[in-house]
Image (spheres, rainbow, N blue to C red):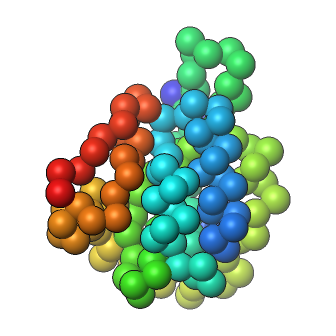
Amino acid sequence: MGAERPLPREVKVIDSASLLRLEERAGDLGLSQRLDPVWVRANAAPGGSHYLWPFLWHTLSHRSDVPDHVRWELLISLRTGGRVVSWLDVVPDDFTPLPSVTSREEGRQVRRLFGQAPSVRDWLLREGGGAGPAVTGVAGRRVRVPG
């Protein structure tokens, strides 16, 4: 799992177009942690700021065609004004150029928001499963939330 490699020491802030590109790229590479781009398009706030917090390096030893990548905690701002948390696997070439949170205080605020926001799955269950194309979960399994 690449524990010997240091994680990026920054929180990334991205717009909705960048979020959608990263989700699509994760899908194209067959990475495990990602959301369905259809769901992202339907639910992410178009003008919202979304945040990536580094969690761990992930290596697919059985797939040499896929580079090592960072599994990020993802905080998504929703059209409805709320926020949800998910995971997103991103390869270094894609996360290196992303803008970082610029102040320590903003980083602290973002960390608090991560702790308060429900997971996408919990949000879908609470909302009655409504907007839900399948969400991709552990090992790339697609999980449909009942609704």
Quadrant of res 15: bottom right
Q: Nearer the viewer, residue 6 or 146?
A: 146
Q: Nearer the viewer, residue 73 or 144?
A: 144
Which residue is rendered at x = 56% and y = 12% of the image?
62
> Compared with residue 112, is residue 138 higher up or lower down, i.e. above or below?
above
**Residue 100 visible somewhere in the drawing:** yes
Residue 44: where, in percent of width, then height?
Answer: 51, 72
Quadrant of res 128: bottom left
Which residue is rendered at x = 46% and y = 59% of the image?
39
Residue 9: where, in percent of width, then height?
Answer: 65, 59
Q: Quick check: 142 left or right of 55?
A: left
Residue 1: where, in percent of width, then height?
Answer: 52, 28
**Residue 115 visible somewhere in the drawing:** no
Residue 40: where, in percent of width, then height?
Answer: 51, 62
> Compared with residue 55, is residue 59 higher up or lower down, i.e. above or below?
above
Q: Quadrant of the C terminus?
A: bottom left
Which residue is rendered at x = 70% and y = 64% of the image?
18
Q: Nearer the viewer, residue 133 or 137?
A: 133
Q: Quick check: 126 left or right of 4?
A: left
Which residue is rendered at x = 71% and y = 81% of the image?
102
Instruction: Residue lying at the far top in this picture: please name it.
Output: 62
